[in-house]
């Protein structure tokens, strides 16, 4: 028993040195892969995920087109070296199909598909490294990739995992913690506070659920801030690059005024 | 919105020209490329014998025993090495296994359909395997833990996450870099129980005997030899030549697919010479010790 790693020690520190509600380092890279319409690479601590979005484009299979909406197709690829043990999972693996279907149903109400009837939006997820919170990372990366592709969304979707160790809620779990304590993944739309996904596969007492759910929703807002900052930075870089192109006289002043109005609205959030 | 419309109608001539050029490129790719080659330049501005810049990043994936991320222009390949223990073959009891695999998923380019690995991915995986065997990059006997009982299997999995032509060169660099980055745990084999114990802390780097590098060329209409083709140029080339060289410039393999002449001359020898020259230049930047 001496070698057992404590999930939460008496000083309030977790196995990787974080506090209870502390999230892991988030790194977001929005520099696009050239062949994709939009792509994002997100890592939460050691969990690393790359998502590429193609679309809206012509559907590959006619029978999958919907007459008044775009069809969303999600494909998940797990790298064999991503987990502790090498595992080559086929495309038809049930676990992976469930994963893909979860991501699809998370984004279906958020992407404004009615704007692109009879077309297809392909979301390809590549999991490079797994250290807990894989679904969380996939959802965050998908949001950013969709935004980077210019596909209209109702709002950002920010996901975070939460767990409970005896009575203390914990956030953003690593593999070690996920294997040990009951946990839930929550995806929220930060502006409205609406929740698009709650998934839990472990047993948790219903009294504890309320706490962890609330804390996870708050954490979603924190992640939202990071994502917004990344998108703003990238957009700023793009605008600066475009600013080097020839400008039309007259449009400059109006555009400047519009910029000011937009900044005020963004800061309100 | 109104300002945007106004600006497009009075936009600078450069923007409508760019649109025209892009449309022409889509509708008549062959003539588009011909026009560039007639001016002694390629659509991305490179010279015929110029390869794209390579950036290599190793060790970023800690769940793998060795890993690398390589960018050859826009072509991006991620590679991870996982080591497992297995029983050796009966007729080679002291040899381990090296299993390279390249994946070209639908994510990397619109030209790859979702589904089982395409023929192209399988062919490239096989050629990479041939290159490893021929170059002797890792001696299989160095992977032996206990003859006849336990050997290492090195699974080298490379995934292309963005495809802009020439996946073979990028994948080879990625796999070799990942192998150079691989550290195997120290092992002890227990004769009585037949089990191998791996040390959690002690790791030794893999013994690398050679670091092969490759250079690919394509021949356009039997007139021009283009090095390191992009995804735009690739479908227009009727012959491709790939040359794999060792550290000392020695030839590991030369592959030619297609009839392969420029004018009436056979180009294989000139490709090998060009590859030797180019690769000795870039080798120190790619494989840093």
Image (cartoon, coloured by chain):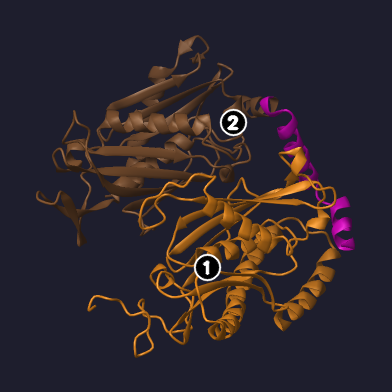
- Chain letter for orange, please: A
Q: Which residue is mark 2?
A: B233
Quadrant of residue B163 within the rendered picture: top right
In this rendering, does residue B83 appear at all? yes
Picture coordinates of residue B60, whole percent (x, y): 39, 58
Q: Gap between marks 1 and 2, in whole Å?
A: 49 Å
Quadrant of residue B127 within the rendered picture: top left
Q: Residue at x 42, y 65 (%)?
A: A131
> Which residues fall within the magenta stretch?
B1-30
Q: Secondary structure beneath disc 2?
A: loop
In this rendering, does residue B249 appear at all? no
User: Does B66 appear above or below B170?
Assistant: below
- Chain letter for brown, please: B
Viewer-proximal residue, A204 or B155? A204
Picture coordinates of residue A30, whole percent (x, y): 58, 60
Viewer-proximal residue, A217 or A208? A208
User: Does B218 appear above or below A181?
Assistant: above
Magenta segment main secondary structure: helix
């Amino acid at each position: 028993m001496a070698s057992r790693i404590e999930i939460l020690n008496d000083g309030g520190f977790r196995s990787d040195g974080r506090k209870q509600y502390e999230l892991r380092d988030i790194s977001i890279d929005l520099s696009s892969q050239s062949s994709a319409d939009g792509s994002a690479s997100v890592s939460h601590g050691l969990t690393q995920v790359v998502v590429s979005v193609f679309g809206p484009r012509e559907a590959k299979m006619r029978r999958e087109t919907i007459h008044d909406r775009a069809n969303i197709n999600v494909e998940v690829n797990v790298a064999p070296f991503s987990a502790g043990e090498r595992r080559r999972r086929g495309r038809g693996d049930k676990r992976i199909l469930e994963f893909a279907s979860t991501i699809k149903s998370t984004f279906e109400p958020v992407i404004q598909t009615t704007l692109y009837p009879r077309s297809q939006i392909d979301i390809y997820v590549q999991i490079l490294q797994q250290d807990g919170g894989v679904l969380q990372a996939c959802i965050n990366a998908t949001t950013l990739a969709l935004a980077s592709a210019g596909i209209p969304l109702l709002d950002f979707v920010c996901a975070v995992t939460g767990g409970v160790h005896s009575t203390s809620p914990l956030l953003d779990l690593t593999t070690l913690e996920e294997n040990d304590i009951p946990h839930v993944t929550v995806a929220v739309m930060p502006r409205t506070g609406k929740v698009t996904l709650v998934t839990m596969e472990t047993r948790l007492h219903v009294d504890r659920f309320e706490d962890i759910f609330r804390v996870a929703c708050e954490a979603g807002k924190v992640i939202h801030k990071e994502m917004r900052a990344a998108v703003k930075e990238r957009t700023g870089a793009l605008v600066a690059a475009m600013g080097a192109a020839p400008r039309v006289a007259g449009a400059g002043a109006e555009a400047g005024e519009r910029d000011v109005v937009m900044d005020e609205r963004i800061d309100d959030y | 919105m109104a300002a945007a419309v106004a600006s497009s109608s009075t936009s600078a001539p450069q923007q409508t020209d760019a649109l025209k050029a892009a449309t022409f490129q889509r509708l008549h790719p062959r003539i588009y490329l011909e026009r560039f080659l007639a001016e002694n330049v390629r659509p991305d501005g490179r010279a015929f014998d110029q390869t794209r810049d390579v950036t290599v990043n190793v060790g970023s994936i800690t769940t793998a025993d060795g890993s690398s991320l390589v960018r050859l222009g826009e072509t991006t390949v991620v590679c991870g090495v996982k080591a497992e223990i297995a029983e050796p073959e009966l007729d080679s009891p002291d040899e381990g296994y090296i299993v390279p695999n390249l994946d070209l998923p639908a994510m990397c380019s619109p030209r790859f359909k979702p589904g089982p690995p395409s023929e192209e991915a399988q062919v490239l995986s096989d050629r990479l395997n041939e290159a490893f065997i021929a170059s002797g990059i890792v001696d299989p006997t160095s992977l032996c833990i206990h003859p006849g009982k336990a050997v290492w299997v090195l699974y080298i999995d490379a995934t292309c996450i963005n495809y802009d032509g020439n996946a073979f060169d990028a994948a080879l660099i990625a796999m070799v870099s990942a192998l150079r980055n691989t550290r195997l745990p120290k092992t002890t084999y227990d004769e009585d129980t037949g089990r191998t114990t791996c040390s959690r802390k002690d790791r030794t780097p893999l013994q690398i005997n050679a670091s092969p590098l490759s250079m690919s060329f394509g021949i356009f209409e039997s007139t021009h030899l283009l090095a390191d083709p992009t995804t735009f140029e690739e479908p227009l080339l009727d012959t491709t030549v790939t040359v794999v060289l060792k550290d000392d410039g020695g030839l590991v393999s030369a592959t030619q697919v297609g009839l392969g002449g420029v004018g009436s001359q056979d180009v294989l020898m000139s490709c090998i010479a060009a590859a030797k020259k180019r690769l000795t230049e870039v080798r120190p930047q790619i494989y840093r010790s």
